[in-house]
Amino acid sequence: MFFGVFPNLRGKYKYACNDLSFDTREEKVCPACGRSYEVSSFRDEPKNFVLDGGKAYPDFLSYTGPSGNMIPFIISARTLKLFEENGISGFVNLGKVICSVKRCSAYILDEQAPEYYLLDFLGTIDFDFKEMHLKKTKTCSACGRFAWSRLRFGSVILDKSSWNGMDICRLASVPNVIVCTEKVEALARKNKLTGLIFQQEQDILSQRGL
Ligand SMILES: [Zn+2]
């Protein structure tokens, strides 16, 4: 069984509202299919997230600000240690990030936030297109963009044969959706990791209103 991993956006927890290395977002047009898309650029400096919101620092820090094609996935040092000690596969540690705490309108650097790390993922899994009666249409051979054959997805069924065996995966067709195995969900439950919600496989897309 797989679970979708989503941020808990209830007011109790602090969240990252800005990435100070974010530079510009430029709109481009694919010359082959004419679809427009945005390309984000970042300044070459350590990731520095501005934190806002609630009082508690969660283990999974959600991000609400401007980003590139991928939403940053930020976890506490405690979570990283648990992942490493328990042999969770499929994640890459991109390093420690700086977290500045926003107080009023100024960015205050001295309020102590716990250590946070930025992750990326090597795991991959995709929909079971046949079981879901779903197709990609009008795929562009130049940019890879496509349209879905229908607007509403309904219940999700994942194709186990598309899974590369890792514990934490990106959903190949919707890469901002993170999917994990039961092992990760059990570890988070046992250690009461905060700031995230696990969604049953069939409901993975309901969080996104699809
Ligand atoms: Zn294209």
Image (cartoon, rainbow, N blue to C red):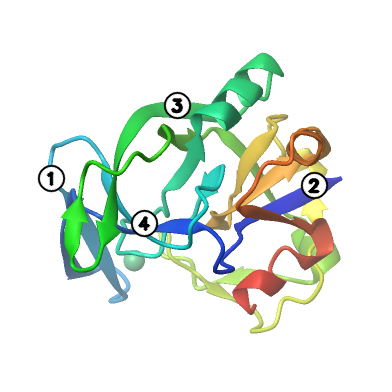
Label 3 residue near ligand 1, CB within 8 Å: no
As measured in the structure, the alpha-carbon distance from the residue carrying label 2 to the one carrying label 3 is 22 Å
User: Dot 1, crowdedness within 10 Å: few (<14), some or many (≥20)?
Assistant: few
Query: Which quadrant would the C terminus be assigned to in this image?
Result: bottom right
Q: Residue at x 65, y 24 (%)?
A: 82
Looking at marks 1 and 3 on the same chain, the residue that comes earlier in the sequence is marked by: 1
Question: Residue 2's mark?
Answer: 2
Q: Label 3: few (<14), some or many (≥20) within 10 Å?
A: few
Closest to the observer: 85 or 143? 85
Which residue is denoted by mark 4 in the rendering? 69
Question: Residue at the spot x=77%, y=33% of the render?
Answer: 187
Tell me if residue 144 comes above or below residue 87 in the rendering: below
Query: Which residue is under mark 3?
Result: 93
**Which badge, 1 or 4, comes first in the chain's sequence?**
1
Mark 1, residue position:
43
Instruction: State how far apart marks 4 and 3 are (Cα).
Output: 18 Å
Relative placement, left or right, of 84 versus 163 is left
Q: Give how far apart the Cα atoms at labels 1 and 2 are.
A: 36 Å
Q: Amino acid at mark 1?
A: Arg
Q: Position of residue 109 (x, y in %)?
A: 21, 44
